[in-house]
């Protein structure tokens, strides 16, 4: 059987372009004992994939050139010679950018029964939610009454992090790239205030939105947005370095204003983390996120791009700010439901 795949054609320099990706037909191997054949239904596109396109030492190995790009996905089991899965099961895990895939079941698990929509397994109740949960609560350690600022606030991780901060009794201010996104975080997600970093004067808007200063900063973005927030940090403020998307396509690091004197004066701390640092506690995080999601205490929109062939452009949309909430690509409908 043949299937369509999208390979990493070459390592991009700066923003990836059409020549970064190659569409090919690939042969799928015959199914052996212990394996399952999956039909891909959904694929998640995520900023960290940009880092895996570079040949650098990191917490995950780079994508090999000439091999399919991979990421979180949801598939339907078409055929199974694996004891844990049956045809029709919906599973989630690390999948190649292919319409069909053969898996030995490692890193694949059932989508939790009753999860609605099932795509929450890639968002609020998946890696996105776990990143927000552990980043905010374990690295940021917010206390009730503190002010938490979130950059990339209308994105997948930022939106969940802000709502968890609200559940913990904090004042929450989000920074995002459009008026529509500011409305989304304040009117739908319940943030106390929102700032449009493209049109507002960031430093004065932050002073106004954070009259008591900033205690915890959940940073998804970096660059000039982060410089502006650091100026408003209170003594002993905590900075959660979750992501630095403003830097992912830079050809060389940007040397902006050097803010470390402020770190000294205000005794700030900044800590990077990777969600997998907390993998031993994923069950706990997933349980709490699923309960909040089910009770409607955490909302999240999805931005859905339809069509396997649109995966590369959907991925690039992350860097244009195309998405509100979790950005997903719908590849196919399930056949067995
Ligand atoms: N540490 C971890 O384990 C971990 C795990 C998952 C994700 N992350 C990181 O968390 C961050 C958010 O990930 P996500 O999946 O939730 O993505 P996302 O926020 O849903 O999507 C990316 C958003 O980033 C904003 N953006 C893009 N380029 C920007 C720029 N130059 N300056 C400012 N904002 C920019 C855009 O929104 P605007 O319209 O607002 O600009 C865009 O919608 C990323 O940095 C990602 O790498 C870290």
Image (cartoon, rainbow, N blue to C red):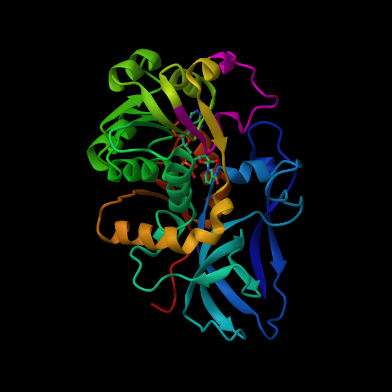
Measured as percent of width and height from the top left, residue 171 is found at: 28, 33
**Residue located 67% across and 46% down the image:** 52
Q: Is residue 102 left or right of residue 213?
A: right
Magenta span covers which residues? Answer: 237-261
Residue 331 visible in the snapshot = no
**Residue located 26% across and 52% down the image:** 297
Measured as percent of width and height from the top left, residue 323 is found at: 42, 41
**Residue 250 sits inside the magenta stretch:** yes
Considering depth in this image, is 302 or 174 the residue closer to the camera? 174
Q: Is residue 294 left or right of residue 4?
A: left
Considering depth in this image, is 21 or 132 the residue closer to the camera? 132
**Residue located 34% across and 49% down the image:** 300
**Residue located 58% across and 83% down the image:** 80
Measured as percent of width and height from the top left, residue 45 is found at: 53, 49
Q: For the stretch drawn in magenta, what is the main secondary structure? A: loop
Considering depth in this image, is 157 or 282 the residue closer to the camera? 282
Q: Residue 218, located in which quarter of the rendered image?
A: top left
Q: Residue 206, located in which quarter of the rendered image?
A: top left
């Amino acid at each position: 059987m043949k299937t369509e795949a999208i390979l990493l054609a070459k390592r991009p320099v700066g923003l990836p372009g059409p020549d970064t990706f190659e569409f090919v037909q690939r042969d799928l191997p015959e199914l052996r004992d212990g394996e399952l054949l999956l039909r891909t239904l959904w694929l998640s596109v995520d900023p960290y994939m940009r880092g895996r396109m570079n040949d650098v030492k990191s917490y995950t190995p780079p994508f090999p050139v000439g091999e399919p790009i991979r990421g979180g996905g949801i598939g339907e089991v078409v055929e199974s010679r694996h004891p844990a899965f049956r045809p029709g099961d919906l599973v989630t895990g690390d999948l190649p950018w292919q319409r069909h895939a053969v898996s030995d079941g490692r890193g694949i698990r059932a989508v939790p029964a009753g999860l609605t929509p099932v795509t929450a397994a890639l968002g609020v109740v998946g890696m996105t939610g776990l990143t927000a949960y552990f980043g905010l609560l374990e690295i940021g350690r917010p206390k009730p009454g503190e002010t938490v600022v979130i950059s990339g606030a209308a994105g997948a991780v930022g939106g969940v992090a802000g709502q968890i901060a609200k559940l913990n009794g904090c004042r929450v201010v989000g920074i995002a790239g459009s008026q529509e996104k500011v409305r989304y975080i304040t009117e739908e997600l319940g943030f106390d205030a929102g700032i449009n970093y493209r049109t507002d004067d960031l430093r004065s808007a932050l002073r106004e939105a954070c009259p008591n200063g900033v205690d915890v900063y959940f940073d998804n973005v970096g660059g000039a947005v982060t410089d502006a927030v650091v100026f408003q940090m209170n003594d002993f403020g905590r900075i959660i370095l979750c992501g630095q998307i403003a830097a992912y396509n830079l050809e060389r690091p940007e040397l902006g204003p050097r803010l470390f004197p402020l770190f000294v004066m205000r005794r700030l701390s900044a800590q990077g983390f990777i969600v997998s640092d907390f993998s031993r506690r994923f069950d706990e995080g997933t349980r709490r996120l699923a309960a909040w999601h089910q009770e409607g205490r955490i909302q999240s929109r999805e931005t859905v791009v339809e069509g396997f062939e649109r995966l590369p452009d959907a991925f690039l949309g992350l860097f244009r700010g195309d998405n509100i909430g979790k950005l997903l690509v719908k590849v196919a409908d399930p056949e067995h439901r």
